[in-house]
Amino acid sequence: MKFYARQSINESDRKAVDDVLQSDYLTQGPSVGAFETGLSKFTGAAHAGTVNSATSALILAYKAVLFQRGFCQGFGDICEKDGHRALIWVAANTFVSTASAARLCGAQVDFIDIDMTSGNMCLDHLTAKLEAAMYLPDIVVPVHFAGVSVDMKRLSELSKRYGFDIVEDAAHGLGGFYDNKPIGSCAYSSAAAVSFHAIKTIATGEGGAVFTNDDHLFELVEGLKSHGVQRKAPMALPDSSADWAPWYYENTALGYNFRMTEIQAALGSSQLERIETFRTHKINLAQTYRDCLANSVVTCLLTDDAMSAHHLMPVLLPEDITEIKKIELFNYCRDGGFQFNVHYYPVNDQPVYADKAGLCPNAMQFYQREISLPFHMDVMPEQAANFAAHLLSFFA
């Protein structure tokens, strides 16, 4: 059975993890710093801070930006400034954590509909919403769906006109490019959050990172991710020539334990060495799917634009597909030896956002038609061709 996504682990990965297991550090050792240095070099961002998940990365990025904008930092508290509650707008086509991270920061959340041709935030809809808004957002969060970047130049122009910060949800984006710059470079944003979940471009099991070029924002992220504790503050020692005690620390802010382990970081560094191999394989695999599905009832969303990170292989089924028919298709494909997944049920239509239900019709139409085909290192081009043929035979 071929699943739609799967991690790729080799002997170098296993050795990297084993070396850590035999070392003196399982956490807070040198591997995390080495991984962060590698990530910063790869993306071109000035700073990379690793954490235990992309959700944690989003929480830290949101909170650091809101703190810079003068909002309070309380976890889960109402985040207000001058009687105004922080407001974060996110794309409706995303995993729930993009929005829930904002709610966990005490912010209000609203949603932007998507472009049906990409699954990304529709900047026309965003512009119209900004022009009509009674209260402007503090942060807008583009999601680079399937690894294809949002038009960040245009979004950056809107941010300057309307005064909001941009935090990129780049969970799908590591390895891709925009404007000849790596996704994660933060050339047009305050920060970007990436994921190292098991099925992402590179895998650490769970894990994520915050990228930024803002020195102060990075200091906030680093402090908040480790309990809000600092070890650099001096402590006077009477009758001693020492300036400070090496065991001394100060809790300067309410923070979290979002640290990445040495085991994860070592695996991440090993995976990062192969990221171009992963991406090249998927670029070729995507071309196979496009060739096999060309001029059919199934529409490929990934174009031949090599700038994409190629995280997912999303396709759109015929417009008249029903939920029951889609379930029948799932069972038909499973019987044919492979499974697909669906990305995503619109976040605004989830029960916790009942007051926003139905506000993003494109996102709902996209969910009704979208499936993500098997797309990982264990899928060979000839298998992809067979999957595509089996998929089309359902509609014959």
Image (cartoon, helix red, strand yellow):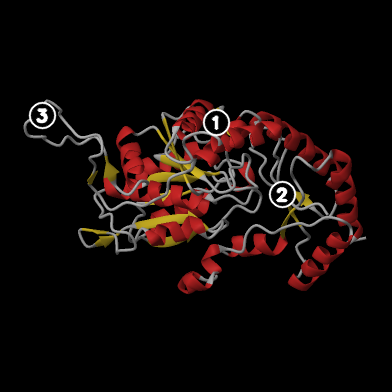
CA gap, disc 1 and disc 2: 23 Å
* Amino acid at pointer 3: Ser
Q: Height in image: 394 above or below 276? A: below
Q: CA distance from mark 1 to mark 3?
A: 51 Å
Residue with the mark numbered 1: 182
Q: Secondary structure at mark 1?
A: strand
Dot 3 corresponds to which residue? 240
In front of the other: 294 or 386: 386
Left or right: where does residue 238 sit relative to residue 225? left
Judging depth in this view, the residue of 93 and 113 nearest the camera is 93
> What x and y, as percent, mark residue 128?
46, 55
Kindly identify the amino acid type of the residue bearing the numbered disc 2.
Ala
Q: Decide: is 136 above or below 222.
A: below
Read off the residue under disc 2.
Answer: 5
Q: Residue at x 45, y 51 (%)?
A: 56
* Quadrant where the N terminus is found in the figure: bottom right
- Residue 172 visible in the displayed image: yes
- Determine whether 14 is above or below 65 in the image: above
Residue type, label 1: Pro
Sooner in the amino-acid sequence: mark 1 or mark 3: 1
Q: CA distance from mark 2 to mark 3?
A: 60 Å
- Of tags 1 and 3, the one toward the viewer is 3
Describe residue 207's horizontal placement relative to residue 119 as left or right. Answer: left
Residue 331, horizontal then vertical, whole percent? 83, 66
